[in-house]
Amino acid sequence: MSQGREDFLKSEEYHAAIAHACLQGARDFLRSAAFRTAVEIKAAHFVNEGFEKCKAQAIKLNGFVDGFDFSRLDASLDNDLEPYPEVPEAEAPTDEFEALIEEVEKLDD
């Protein structure tokens, strides 16, 4: 029995199944709310970091008038000092595994 298991673990069929499972797991994660949240957090971090670097360069290059109140700088405002328009959220599944469930249901049909 152990030889049969050992042979199976070395087989192409087993390695292909594992590779397919890994790929499917990655696809499911990319569709998940957890992934979208992680991307949004990272994007917000990069935007803020870029804003701070830009502000630091402007200060170093004397781009601000003496006495300028830096607390008035707001990365959430556009060129006209108006809030950016709300971006409609894409319709995301409420359940992060909904896409996977739909895919499995299609296979059953």
Image (spheres, rainbow, N blue to C red):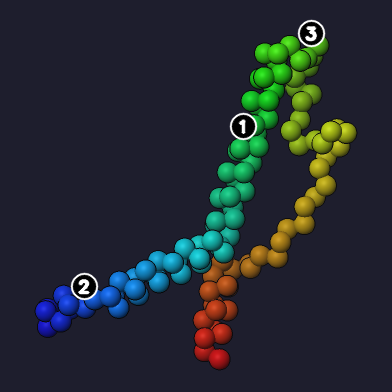
> What amino acid is at disc 2?
Lys
Q: Position of residue 92 (x, y in %)?
A: 66, 65
Q: CA distance from mark 1 to mark 3?
A: 24 Å
Secondary structure beneath label 3: loop
Q: Counting residues from the N terminus, which is met first, the one under dot 2 or under dot 1? A: 2
* The C terminus lies in quadrant: bottom right
Q: Residue at x 57, y 72 (%)?
A: 99
With 58 as the anchor, is 102 left or right in this view?
left
Q: Residue at x 64, y 25 (%)?
A: 53
In this rendered view, identify the residue nearer to me: 29 or 61. Answer: 61
Q: Counting residues from the N terminus, which is met first, the one under dot 3 or under dot 2? A: 2
**In this figure, which residue is indicated by the disc labeled 2?**
10
Total marks drawn?
A: 3
> What amino acid is at disc 3?
Asp
In this rendered view, identify the residue nearer to me: 46 or 69. Answer: 46
Count neighbours of disc 3 (C-alpha within 10 A) and say few if under 14, some if 14 to 19, many if 20 or more: few
> What amino acid is at disc 1?
Glu
Q: CA distance from mark 3 to mark 2?
A: 72 Å
Secondary structure beneath label 2: helix
Q: Position of residue 35 (x, y in %)?
A: 55, 56
Q: Counting residues from the N terminus, which is met first, the one under dot 1 or under dot 3? A: 1
**In this figure, which residue is indicated by the disc labeled 3?**
66
Return the residue found at the far front. Answer: 12
Q: Position of residue 101 (x, y in %)?
A: 54, 77
In this rendered view, identify the residue nearer to me: 5 or 98. Answer: 5
**As displayed, is residue 26 above or below residue 9?**
above
With 14 as the anchor, is 34 left or right in this view?
right
Q: Position of residue 51 (x, y in %)?
A: 68, 30
